Image (cartoon, rainbow, N blue to C red):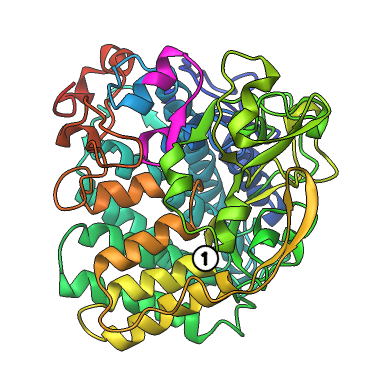
């Protein structure tokens, strides 16, 4: 008889977290030896991971909204305590948003571990099973990359079951990064060049994330080795974009149009909500969370929770097509077409007279439910434009002319204009001269600003703030001059989130707590 602390029990693709005293032939537990016999069984375990990632507790709402609120671009219109803590950078150790996405992250990781361990019991050629197992390695790296950037040192588990006598403590961030790199390198070896859906990782996705990992590890330094590795991985993707079937989409709006995104070459890895509404809160809620309160579109409009700070709109050049795509400055409310200066006509206490995020509620697709609470969106976790900007940032000190070429390629797409909506009406925005190409030497600040505009409201800005330590000088994004004004609660300790107090109570080995909490 053995006693195990199980982090996940895989049963028909669903995960259950808990503890069990396991006798021989336990009822209700599918052991790896008994369940995994074919490549399809490995894929079933991998699919459980995808389910966790699109869950409301992860990218469907909690994780994505927390990342938006912690940035300098998204303010809060509602008054829920856990969201106010995120927005004001006064997060406590019992924050309910963390209490959702922390365990959900580990459930996803545990499903990956099940797939990887189970694959050893499948007696087929490596060429048949390893490309499936490589999905699990990629997804495990993806999840740990989120965790280590948010919490620093975190428990690192790479097996589906831990003996009860074992202690689970926090692995140093450097060790977690080493493991992330190893997983991505395995994925590069075995993933295919292209896949039937951008929601299935490809070799390009692994190279792209490895580039971002190295850029993140370089942090706010000019570490030549790490920047060189980031550049090499990003340039590999750029130089082989035809092989990987990648390119910038001709119309920026297509990236946020659920009816067109499947045909786009720009997404490299995406989370796919197309026709999915699970019983475990699996559906997408970013559209209503960021939508205009009282908007007639989508049978009731949005919930007016996460909204751009007004300065985000007023300081963004009006001739940059990306502003028109990224924010709504007009809407139909109660049958009346109104500008953003009159959005409070809806009468709701959370409505604000300022532009709203439009990337998610404008074209939610055929599957959209009331308030677009479920959508057909494919959310790009990394896309080709970001790879160009990674390469630009990583090459500033070694090949500044090439950095300028890459950043200007992104800006050139923005100048093309395209087909979007304004106040709920379809409009065509023509090409114009802005944003103009950069000339002269490119700086880190140039790339960070381009990332802010190109990737606005995509859950990326907070990570840029952390890795470049932008809260203080010289960027001072949380000062009175910042887009949201001063966030008085900010200190350098806020670059990391706290480990939940209830997690430490259950397992004191998670101490020490992150500084400042």
Q: Residue 331's x, y, as percent?
A: 72, 37
Above or below: residue 415 compared with residue 450: below
Q: Which residues are magenta?
A: 69-84
Instruction: Classify the position of the N terminus by image quarter.
Output: top left
- Judge whether residue 438 is colored magenta: no
Above or below: residue 335 compared with residue 362: above
Instruction: Classify the position of the C terminus by image quarter.
Output: top left
User: Left of 507 or right of it: where is 434?
Assistant: right
SS state under label 1: helix
Q: Residue 154's x, y, as percent?
A: 28, 36
Q: Residue 253's x, y, as percent?
A: 67, 59
User: Left of 210 or right of it: where is 266?
Assistant: right
Q: Residue 228's x, y, as percent?
A: 25, 77
- Judge whether residue 71 is colored magenta: yes
Pick the residue in front: 291 or 168: 291
* Residue appearing at x 46%, y 76% in the figure: 436
Above or below: residue 22 compared with residue 491: above
User: Left of 491 or right of it: where is 262?
Assistant: right
Pick the residue in front: 100 or 378: 378
Which picture quadrant has residue 281?
top right
Residue under label 1, please give it. 205
């Amino acid at each position: 008889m053995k006693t195990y602390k199980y982090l996940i029990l895989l049963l028909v693709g669903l995960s259950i977290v808990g503890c069990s005293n396991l006798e021989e032939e336990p009822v209700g537990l599918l052991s790896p030896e008994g369940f995994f016999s074919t490549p399809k069984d490995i894929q079933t375990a991998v699919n459980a991971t995808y389910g966790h990632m699109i869950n409301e507790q992860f990218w469907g709402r909690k994780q994505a909204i927390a990342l938006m609120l912690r940035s300098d671009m998204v303010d809060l219109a509602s008054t829920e305590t856990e969201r106010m803590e995120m927005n004001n950078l006064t997060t406590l150790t019992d924050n309910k948003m963390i209490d959702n996405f922390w365990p959900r992250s580990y459930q996803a990781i545990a499903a990956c571990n099940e797939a990887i361990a189970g694959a050893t019991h499948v007696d087929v050629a490596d060429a048949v099973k390893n490309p499936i197992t490589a999905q699990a390695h990629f997804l495990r790296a993806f999840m740990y990359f989120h965790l280590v950037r948010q919490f620093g040192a975190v428990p690192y588990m790479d097996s589906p079951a831990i003996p009860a006598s074992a202690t689970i403590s926090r692995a140093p961030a450097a060790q977690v990064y080493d493991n992330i790199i190893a997983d991505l390198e395995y994925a590069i070896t075995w993933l295919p060049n292209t896949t039937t859906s951008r929601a299935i990782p490809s070799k390009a996705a692994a190279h792209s994330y490895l580039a971002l990992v190295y850029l993140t590890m370089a942090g706010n330094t000019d570490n030549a080795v790490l920047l060189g590795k980031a550049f090499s991985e990003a340039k590999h993707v750029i130089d082989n974009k035809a092989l990987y079937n990648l390119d910038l989409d001709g119309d920026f709006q297509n990236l946020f149009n659920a009816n067109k995104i499947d045909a786009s070459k720009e997404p490299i890895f995406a989370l796919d909500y197309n026709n999915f509404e699970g019983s475990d809160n699996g559906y997408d809620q970013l559209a209503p969370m960021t939508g205009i309160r009282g908007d007639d579109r989508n049978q009731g409009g949005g919930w007016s929770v996460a909204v751009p700070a007004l300065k985000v709109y007023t300081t963004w050049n009006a001739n940059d097509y990306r502003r028109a795509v990224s924010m709504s400055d007009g809407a139909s409310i109660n049958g009346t077409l109104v500008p953003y200066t009159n959005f409070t006509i809806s009468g709701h206490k959370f409505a604000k007279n300022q532009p709203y995020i439009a990337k998610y509620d404008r074209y939610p697709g055929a599957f959209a439910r009331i308030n677009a609470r479920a959508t057909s969106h494919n959310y790009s976790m990394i896309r080709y434009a970001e790879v160009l900007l990674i390469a630009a940032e990583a090459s500033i000190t070694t090949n500044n002319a090439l950095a300028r070429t890459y950043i200007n390629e992104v800006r050139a797409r923005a100048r093309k204009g395209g087909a979007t909506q304004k106040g709920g009406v379809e409009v065509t925005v023509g090409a114009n001269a802005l944003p103009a190409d950069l000339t002269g030497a490119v700086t880190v600040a140039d790339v960070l600003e381009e990332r802010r505009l190109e990737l606005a409201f995509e859950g990326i800005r907070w990570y840029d703030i952390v890795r470049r330590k932008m809260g203080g000088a010289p960027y001072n994004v949380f000062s009175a001059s910042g887009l949201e004004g001063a966030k008085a609660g900010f200190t350098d300790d806020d670059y990391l989130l706290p480990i939940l107090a209830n997690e430490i109570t259950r397992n004191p080995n998670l101490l020490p707590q992150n500084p400042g909490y």
